[in-house]
Image (cartoon, grey):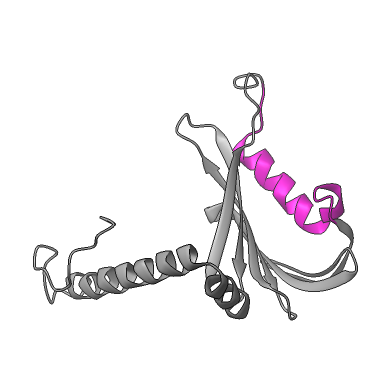
Amino acid sequence: MLTLSWTRPVVDTGQEGRGGPTREKLWQALLHKAEHPAEYVPAIAECRIHDRYADGLLREIRRGEHTFLQRVTAQEGAGRIVYRHLDHTDIAEIRNEIGEDEQGRLTLTLSITLTDDRAAAILAQNPYLRDLDSDFHGTLDAMTAVLRQVSTGAGTAGTQTAPPDPNGS
């Protein structure tokens, strides 16, 4: 899978310390956005809630000429709302996540995870991304092999079982 993300501070420069949003108020605004996305996302024309659950809802949105069915899950402890597409689209999942920057200001991260088919098509068209993907897949394979050993007590992190990671990750 291929995930892209963008992060922005929620408070504009110069607004710090002047009654900006709190984490709780931002969380409540994200919950409102989940039910009323047209007020927040210019590309969404309308939204219908089909069902409600203890952890979220099932909604149908219209974006341009397309209609999408999404299972929305609110994860308050993580400060994250996940929108999983239930119908065929290029996007498997969208996330809105509250965080903090280096100065302690609240941030919002918007990320999308593309479906495997779309990610494969993009990687096939772009040699740089394909090489980067291949390199980091290898890095992740090496890391997880060592982490499995260390976390089960079968080895120590100082025992090299895989070639060194050229990325230093």
Looking at the rendering, the stretch of residues picked out in magenta corresponds to 19-43
The reply, left or right, for residue 109 in relation to residue 149 is right
**Visible residue check, residue 50:** no
Residue closer to the observer: 6 or 151: 6
Residue plotted at (63% across, 18% down): 14
- Quadrant where the C terminus lies? bottom left
The overriding secondary structure of the stretch rendered in magenta is helix
Residue nearest the viewer, comparing 141 with 127: 127
Q: Is residue 17 left or right of residue 89?
A: left
Residue plotted at (57% across, 36% down): 106
Could you tell me which residue is drawn at 57 percent across and 71 percent down? 125
Residue at 59% from the left image edge and 55% from the top image edge: 80
Please indicate whether residue 40 sits to the left or right of residue 151 in the image.
right
In magenta segment, residue 32: yes
Q: Residue 124: percent from the left, percent from the top?
A: 54, 75
Q: Position of residue 57 (x, y in %)?
A: 75, 68
| 162 is higher (above) or lower (below) than 8 | below
Q: Is residue 163 left or right of residue 55?
A: left
* 75 in relation to 147, above or below: above
Where residue 53 appears, as percent x and y from the top left, is: 72, 71
| Total tally of numbered discs in the picture | 0
